[in-house]
Amino acid sequence: MPSAVDDTSTTASSADAQAIGIGLAIPALVVLLAAAMIASLSIGRYSVGLGDLATLVSGWLGIGPGRAGVAEPVWRVVELVRIPRMLIGGFVGAGLALSGAVLQGVFRNPLVDPHVIGVSSGAAFGGVFAILLGLGAAALWSMAFAFGLAALLLVVMMSRKAGRSSILMLVLSGVVISALFSALVSLATYLADPNDTLPAIVFWLMGSFASATPERALLMVPIVAVFALPLMLMRFRINILSLGDEEARGLGLKVEPTRWLVLCCVTGITAASVANSGIIGWVGLVVPHFARSLVGPDHMRLLPASALLGASFMLLVDVMARSLIPAEIPLGVLTAIVGAPVFMILLHRTHNEGW
Amino acid sequence: MIEAQSLGFRYAANAPWLFCDLSFSLAPGQTLVLLGRNGRGKTTLLKCMAGLISPTAGSIRSKGIVGYVPQHFASPFAYSVFDVVLMGRARHVGLFSNATAVDRQRAAQALETVGLQAFARRSIGTLSGGERQLVLIARALASEADILLLDEPTSALDFRNQAVVLSMLRRLSTERGLTIVMTTHEPTHALEIANRAILLYGAGHNEEGPVASMCTEEKLSALYAISMKKLAYTTGEGQTSSIVASYASIDR
């Protein structure tokens, strides 16, 4: 009786070396995030020294002088401007990267990102509509959120109407709804007053964390956290969804309810980030790829790695945005300029054996 | 155990039956092979048994966990062999939980059963077709399946790997009492490992019975619409037989 199948290519030792590299990747990403956080707190038009930063941190921990040990502008800048901005930037980056990684897994397509299910465009239209009507920040927030959810519902209804709610129908419906809301955004932009509302719309759409305030951070952070937590807990389920409907069903998974639960969480995160800082592209596409090249495709490791890397990436891009030139560069522009070449390199390096 | 009562399937109310009035019952440790030409409903019947599609008529009842083994591993992601086997634990892991030490242990045992423990960390994409088929079987074993449903598990394999997979299935049924159902285009494989066979002629014509009375030259020739011969011969391992198609019968 034949006992074993023929062996092929790679050796056990290279697999071991790879496993060690994967083990180190997450701690390395934590260190990177810490560095990005420090950079985000200290670099800017008003530079905060590392010594002052350490004094403030020791004050928060109750082991040092804190505010008393630094000049007043320093703690005001750090506590009222930089920390909210860091929190918002970090959570937006982590949330978008996490959403991208999850969607790529669930749709089994490495080229998917949060824009694909139409949520970004829906939320963008909601925000633009609010600006067009001259409504305040709270209204902008709620409308972006509401229209993001509405876009998801439309996608759900369309893909159901079209028969079996398959992945292909879902993606196609997403593209259609996305195109519809993009057109509505264009219409709103066309109708906007060129002296007043048009610039507001354009700058909001291009993305910025410049409007960060402690109140906004307090609103934004819990929302992203509430939607990100279930995704983190469902990592094993997301692995199984990534096998495709039939295999997942064959393994005993209730595919559709699980997938919709995942999509609702992604919608919450995406709508919250668009509402807060406009459309920031590329993070949800590029960061999961980069993370996958570090820790492999297993979502158990990929999701934390993507979130860590997304937060670091966003913070560093934001630092660049506010320090490269005297004026702030829109984030969406910078993420594209940084993301496009990185993505091309990643695609070039991808092996034939899978993502 | 699987029990089917007058099972039937058709794609639409006015479409012809793919199979109909199909009743059979399989005890633990028994192996059933589904034979038939392309498009005659082998995979459909298997998916009905797996609960992936509902039959148009009749009912199917299975006792125990059903492990469905697809023909190919279709994920675009380069999961490690161990990760793939661990996914077999899906039924045992809660919605908001992750695989526990017990799950990992069961996955490791399943991988050991198919003899691929040394491949655990390899990416599934680097494995040969035979190895991948064994990984998919290990995944079903990790689910603690009592019933294995395999869709053409030997179709893309070379002769040696076909033998590896068949002997693995035989071992799982005799040693562990698993109920096994597989589709195949090789009636010889039915002779090798099966107790029972279902012949799907298409257009609602089908029969079920012990493998010896199903895999006759006359029935198989009718089933495949080509002359089939059963050859009995002696090898170093003893008396054996193979079923072959007479390809020349088509041209002349």
Image (cartoon, coloured by chain):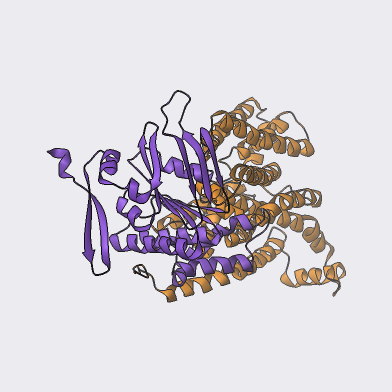
Q: Residue at x 21, y 60 (%)?
A: B233
Along the viewing direction, whichever of A268 and B252 lies nearer the viewer = B252
**Residue A198, image x and y in percent?**
66, 32
**Residue A318, image x and y in percent?**
64, 55
Can the viewer see residue A316 in this picture? yes
Q: Quadrant of residue B165?
A: bottom left
Question: Compared with residue A12, is residue A219 higher up or lower down, i.e. above or below?
Answer: above
**Left or right of residue B241: residue A307:** right
Q: The N terminus of chain A is located in which quarter?
A: bottom left
Q: Residue at x 15, y 44 (%)?
A: B248
**Left or right of residue A21: residue B100:** right
Q: How many marks?
A: 0
Q: Residue at x 78, y 50 (%)?
A: A213
Question: Compared with residue A67, is residue B38 higher up or lower down, i.e. above or below?
Answer: above
**Left or right of residue B189: residue A249:** right
**Residue A298, image x and y in percent?**
54, 60
**Residue B2, image x and y in percent?**
52, 48
Along the viewing direction, whichever of B26 and A78 lies nearer the viewer = B26
Along the viewing direction, whichever of B222 and A258 lies nearer the viewer = B222
- The tint chain A carries is orange
- The tint chain B carries is purple
Q: Residue at x 67, y 64 (%)?
A: A39
